[in-house]
Image (cartoon, rainbow, N blue to C red):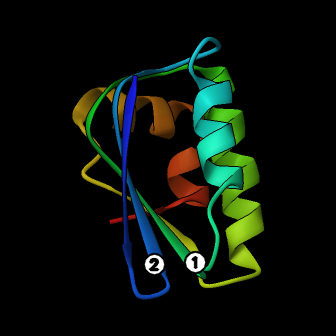
Amino acid sequence: MTIEKKMDGKTMTMCVSGRLDTLTAPDLEKEIHAIEGADALVMDFANLDYISSAGLRLLLSTHKAYAKKGGMTVKNVNETVLDIFEVTGFKDILNIA
């Protein structure tokens, strides 16, 4: 998994590529916790191939944390990841653009 970060005003965009699973979720969690000065978070999943339950848990906790600020948006979700969001009910929880 690779993570590219870009700050635009008070919005942090994180482009996540590869697999978000048990092995890589802790790395993304560290990057999210290291964000300073952002009120909103955009997760760009254009190049995300797979997400496991560990990745879903991280998204849920991050969504809750940013709901108290400017919110979290997930964008560029491919069909495979969107299917996982639909089956797990995350499509109704997350703000997917």
Earlier sequence position, callout 2 versus callout 1: 2
Which structural element holds mark 1? loop
Q: Position of residue 53 (x, y in %)?
A: 65, 22
Q: Where is residue 66 in the image (x, y as percent from the top left)?
A: 68, 71
Q: Assign the C terminus to one quadrant of the image.
A: bottom left
| Three-letter code for the amino acid on which mark 1 is drawn | Ala
Residue at point 62% right, 62% down? Answer: 35
Q: In this view, does 23 lie above or below 45?
A: above
Residue under label 2 = 11
How many residues crowd around disc 1 within 10 Å: few (fewer than 14), some, or many (20 or more)? some
Q: Where is residue 15 in the image (x, y as percent from the top left)?
A: 33, 47
Outermost residue on the top side: it is 23
| Three-letter code for the amino acid on which mark 2 is drawn | Thr
Residue under label 1 = 38
Which structural element holds mark 2? strand
Left or right? Give the position of 83 relative to 95: left
